[in-house]
Image (cartoon, grey):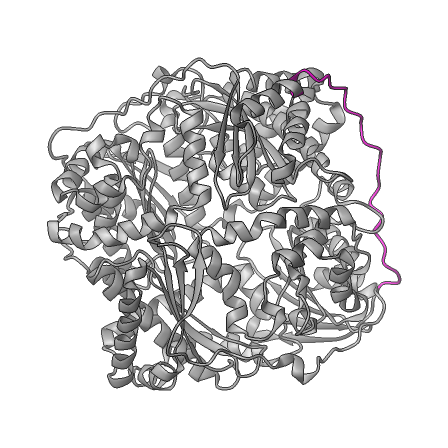
Amino acid sequence: MRRFLSAASALAIVLATPFHAASLPLPKLGSLGLGKEQAQSVLPAGAWPQAKSDVAADPAIRFGALPNGMRYAIRRQQIPPGQAAIRLRFDAGSMMETDQQQGLAHFLEHMAFNGSKAVPEGDMIKILERLGLAFGADTNASTNFDETIYKLDLPRTDEETIDTAVMLMRETAGNLTIDQGAVDRERGVVLSEERARDTPAYRVYKARLDFFLKGQLPPTRYPIGKVEVLQSAPASQIADFYHRYYRPERAVLVVVGDFDVDAMEAKIKSRFGDWIATGPAGTAPNLGAVKSRGAEAKLVVEPGAPLSMQLAWIRPPDLAPDMLAKRKHDLVEQLGFAILNRRLQRLARGAEPPFLGAGSFVSDEYDAADLATVIVSAEPGRWREALWAAEQEQRRAMEYGVRRDELDREIIEYRASLGAAAAGAATRTPAGLAAEIVASVGAREVVTNPAQDLAFFEETVKGLKADQVSAALKSAFKGDGPLLFVASPQAIEGGEGTLLSALESSRKTAVSEPAAPSEVNWPYTSFGAIGKVAETTDVTDLDAAFVRFENGVRLTVKPTKFKDDEVLVRVNVGGGRLDLPKDQENMSWASGAFIEGGLKQISAEDLERVLASKVYGAQFGVTDDAFVFSGTTRPDDLDAQMQVLAAYVSEPGWRPQAFARLQSAGKTIHDQYEATDSGVLTRDLAALLHPGDERWTFPTRQEIASAKLDTFKSQIDGALASGPVEVVVVGDITVEKATQAVARTFGALPARKPDQPPEAQRQVSFPTGNGKPVVLTHKGRGDQSIGYIAWRTNDFFANPQRARDTAVMGEVLGLRLIDELREAQGATYSPSVSYNHSMIWPGWGYVSASVEIPPEKLPGFFDEVRKIAADLREKEVSADELARAKTPRVDQIEKARKTNGYWLRELSGAQADPRRLDAVRAIVSGTERVTAADVRRAAEAVLRDENMWTLEVRPARK
């Protein structure tokens, strides 16, 4: 995490997770902020930031540069074996565009996949698919204000795969053809992406940036660009940007993975050594100066957006080289922000919270300005109360500083997090490592490793005083302002004048010194007599063990070495959705209030404080067959992790404040969903695919408003009290240690009884084919719509191999949709195919196809899918198409099997239903054996016109 958090990212954090707005993610100490003078940040071509820094770079990375100025970073990472990640970054984004090129930096990113000197148009994705790379998952790119990044995640590191990947990156760098016909075919794809991005949240973001960076360049250069440019710009304009900014001195190639570093360096030199830029170089953009400003307010009324406020202080950007002294300053400052965030969280968790969530942070606004911001999410009718509370809490920190006990807590948490990162450093993924290096390039920072970060942290906090943190926090808010930005779903009487008046009124209110919290102890260290093991069974071929305790609790353990010092825990209790009534309101929408409600003997706030030195997690959710508690920990903290989850199962707190906050946030949730076509689909699709069953129905406005915590409690209390419990532990752990930890917690609970829900609870309907689509409407743009098709299949266990055949058929269908709707017609950015064969609901499964497309093109989408379906029924696919469908799927599975998360998910429920183990064993071989004839038979059985259930999400207005 960079020191300067993007304000847009922070906004998403606060609004999406109102229960966890206190502490923003810990900064990545190896990529903390920059210094004060921009002139010092300029590096000569080919130089890395460590050339002008006293920060030592990670010695495991080989940094280099070619004579033409292109830089490269290579790192060997043998875990997981046989994988690699390649990233090609250009110092070229939307801020480098001219007025006539707005959107063409991003358009160029699309054209990189549409033809070069060595790769004809349409062939690049197919080449990668043959090597096992899935489009989107393994093959992707992104364009931002200041950079464009191309990404390849390689499932293997044999010579063919590596050579092909490096060749394709070289083609992108200097050999794109940018053919006019290809540009014209791609216009619809880019315009589809523009439509999909234009949401209330995006419009609020743009208004916010325009207000804060008044008169500066970034608000005039959004990466998606202008529609009129995208509709008509000639290929020559794209080529002009390409030649000016895709140049060796602006390029960095990052390669991380299981290969020989010397051999990789030789390949890079061979491939990129002859790259010579064409034509004159582009110039650096003039971002404009930060204007001197006093107190200002901006109100944006955006129906469909939640109410959010940002109170900010602005100052010139901080752009000097990465130095140890600056890192120390930034770390001390971040500790101060963490303390302020704890205080804001405490307010949100109070008996009468003034807001839904709040957070504070420093953000680097694309090198144009720095902002120190307090951001707030609130109910529309309570904006004034929320503003006052947030402003006064920020000012309280300015006037009285931070306390020693607060600082000690943050140091403890940072130390635990950094220690865990250092312990697991050797098993970081190639993609994660590559992302860190690329992020450092954009920030002009030295790449350091977790051990270096931990050592630097310890050196910095040694002897650190609360007064020093107070001074750093106070200094962070010494900018012009305050600038108050408010986005509201409804008008505020008096507009911006009212906002400024409310702000000034709050600033005149005296604040008092904060009180220290009372001391607390962790009360859940004992759950009774240690449980006894009744039976242990080894599942040797999967390196797992099944343990059954005398009280009926089951434990599944799989020791792994995928990631050092990581242990994942999942606890399945009861039957989940199987336990819920079919004809009553489903309260699982309130699941977020469960953990936040704390425990019977200790609040969530105090729980986090007393366990600050531990690495643990506490999440709760409702799945088809269980109420699920989960967390991520490390071997040394496994006992604490088990204690936390066992306490939530045995003595949840059910505090009403958390439920009330979620209920308040729900007042505008329907407006947010209805503002976009994708929002309506997200809200309503599950209920439509399970007709007549309230377990999948999203609650109405009235149901949310009138919901009672006791109703939620009644739906899961029985399962928590006596339902079956299955604990799954996967990671850097032994069977013995996991068994002991569970014996002391879940194994010590009162006896659990097996639970078989009535057969009627397992019966779920699926919509029948319809000749006329179901129509839903949204309140967004008139050119936004979604077409959706689903064909019923079957459950997984009805015929496991047929389910695998159907999955591969679904992959072929996806390839066809991309080839036709995206590549050939340029009609859409995101045709999508998914498939689901349930292991819970008998007879229930489906294959679906969907697309974002203008409303007038919906009939064409349905017709095209019918044609593709008919062709798949009538003809066998080619060997090449079958391979392009199967190989990425198999490789994705193989990659997933080298992660703890995969095994946590796949082993869940396996003791109760051993068929799941057979499914895990056969998934790769079963996929590999699928033939072209199998795909055709699956299409004949599933993709029948009479089985098509169709849905349209259209604009409510034209």
Tell me where residue 406 appears, x and y as whole percent.
Answer: 72, 28
> As displayed, is residue 942 above or below residue 607?
below
- 583 or 317, which lies in front? 583
Tell me: 435 left or right of 733. left
Q: Position of residue 491 (x, y in %)?
A: 53, 36
Q: Nearer the viewer, residue 867 or 736?
A: 867
Residue at horizontal 68 percent and vertical 28 percent from the top = 389
Name the residue located 42 percent from the left edge and 46 percent from the top edge. Answer: 199
Residue farthest right in this picture: 529
Q: Which quarter of the figure is the C terminus placed in?
A: bottom left
**Principal secondary structure, stretch drawn in magenta:** loop
Magenta segment: 506-530
Asked if residue 642 shows in the view, the reply is yes
Residue 649, position in %: x, y?
Answer: 77, 60
Q: Quadrant of residue 213?
A: top left
Quadrant of the rendered image containing residue 329: top right
Return the residue nearer the eye: 371 or 723.
Answer: 371
- At x 48%, y 40%, the residue is 302
Q: Position of residue 214 (x, y in %)?
A: 39, 22
